[in-house]
Image (spheres, coloured by chain):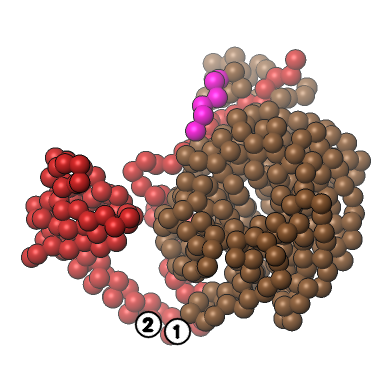
Amino acid sequence: MAMRQTPLTCSGHTRPVVDLAFSGITPYGYFLISACKDGKPMLRQGDTGDWIGTFLGHKGAVWGATLNKEATKAATAAADFTAKVWDAVSGDEVLTLAHKHIVKSVNFTQDSSCLLTGGNDKTIRIYDINKPEAEPQEITGHTSAIKKALWCNNDTQILSAADDKTVRLWDRTSTAVVKQLSFDMSVSSMEYIPDGEVLVITYGKTIAFYNALSLDLIKTVDAPASIHSASLHPDKDFFVAGGDDFKLYKYDYSTKEELESYKGHFGPVHCVRFSPDGELYASGSEDGTLRLWQTEVGKTYGLWKCVLPEELVSENSDTIYCTPAAPEIKA
Amino acid sequence: MRTPMSVLRLPRGPDPNSRGFDPDSPRFIALCSTTISSSTDTETDSVQIGEEQCARSMLRESFLRTLIAMTNKQVQFYMYERVKVNAVFVASDIDVLNFQVSDLQTPIGVQKEALLRCQDVILYSFDL
């Protein structure tokens, strides 16, 4: 019996959610960080969406947020011209890295020793977290604001997407451009999948998949509306995308067939990411909420429980209820 | 007609009174001492951590004592946007997110009771 998707709404932010990231799988589960224009990034338990804490300190909109693999450190990029590193267990601010303009993107290396930043000053910077007073290594070349900068190829190379309509692959040691992709319009988002070296890029209504090492195009898929973000499932069987029409789309990666579309958000979807175990994906929207969606609707996981019709009317059952009929509460 | 997927409860939202990161959570208890330092060897670590902890305790105690000393005194608060206000300090909340003050002198009048958001305060001073 096919079930209808029930998204879980995480409220708490008071302005649009512009970025989100998952940690790896830790002994305490996995975690989710959300970047919000209200300046208060939040940490949540990844499989339930339960709020754990809010990182307080930024004085402007937070444009980018990330967690290290072990979810022990968090980093945020903000409109107050700083990137901050946080202890993700205690919530304490550990480092403030001053920049010359709005910072948009932050990314840790696998061993969490270095932080990559990029933003409106068009320069990519590499900070050694253990030596924060040292001058960062700088990589210049982009002619417009950088939207996203990510480590790739075992942290030996860097991928960056900017408003100059290019995506560039840089060598970390030489800081030279290895390869460049040019587009007719600005890239709206970029996701790097280390396992399999896949790069997911969105622009206009297109979701494009590239080989992250060679930047050779694998395939493109066009959606019904302008897409702001897309994410590929860890097993590479599905991908999800969201954008201007407030909906989440789920596609089969091999056949490019649109499998499902879900309504739920009250504003454009700015970011979407699969969890590290692929069981759910999280979306952040202009409406100020995060929503968690099941990859396989009907499966018991996290807060979702598969309940047989007889159990719903049983007197012995726990408080189990269906939420779709309930009115949506705007953040 | 598909049956909607059932849910045990909704995700828990933020606590309005604190910034979270529950120190009683298993993760905090297990990890918090080790997140102070990351990669160096353990022997010198415990000495350094011990010294650092002593310094932290001293500073924390001094800070708390200043809050006690400030109670019911006139305090000048220097805040962002070149705001400088005088008020009588009453209390702080547990996470030092807000200060409760009385007779807050503002350009548009005296506010009998007010809350100052600590993140907006750059420095404050008072006479002992």
Chain letter, colour red: B
Q: Are marks 2 and 1 on the same chain?
A: yes
Q: Residue at x 39, y 50 (%)?
A: B19
* Chain A drawn colour: brown
SS class, disc 2: helix
- Tell me whether circle 2 and circle 1 mark residues in contact (CB < 8 Å): yes
Whole-percent x and y of residue B106?
19, 46
Q: Please name the predominant secondary structure of the magenta segment in the image.
A: loop
In the drawing, does residue A175 fall left or right of residue A215? Answer: left
Q: Which residues are magenta?
A: A326-331
Residue A124 numbered mark, or none:
none
The N terminus of chain A appears in which quarter of the rendering?
top right
Q: Residues within 10 Å of mark 1 (few under 14, many from 20)?
A: few
Chain under disc 1: B
Outermost residue toward the bottom?
Answer: B44
In the drawing, does residue B127 fall left or right of residue A292? Answer: left
Kind of residue at badge 2: Val
Q: Residue at x 67, y 44 (%)?
A: A272
Q: Which residue is mark 2?
A: B47
Counting labels gives 2
Please tell me whether residue A218 is drawn above or below residue A49 in the rendered image.
below
Q: Residues within 10 Å of mark 2 (few under 14, many from 20)?
A: few
Q: Residue at x 16, y 41 (%)?
A: B109
Res. A294 in view? no
Q: Which residue is mark 1?
A: B43
Whole-percent x and y of residue B44?
43, 85
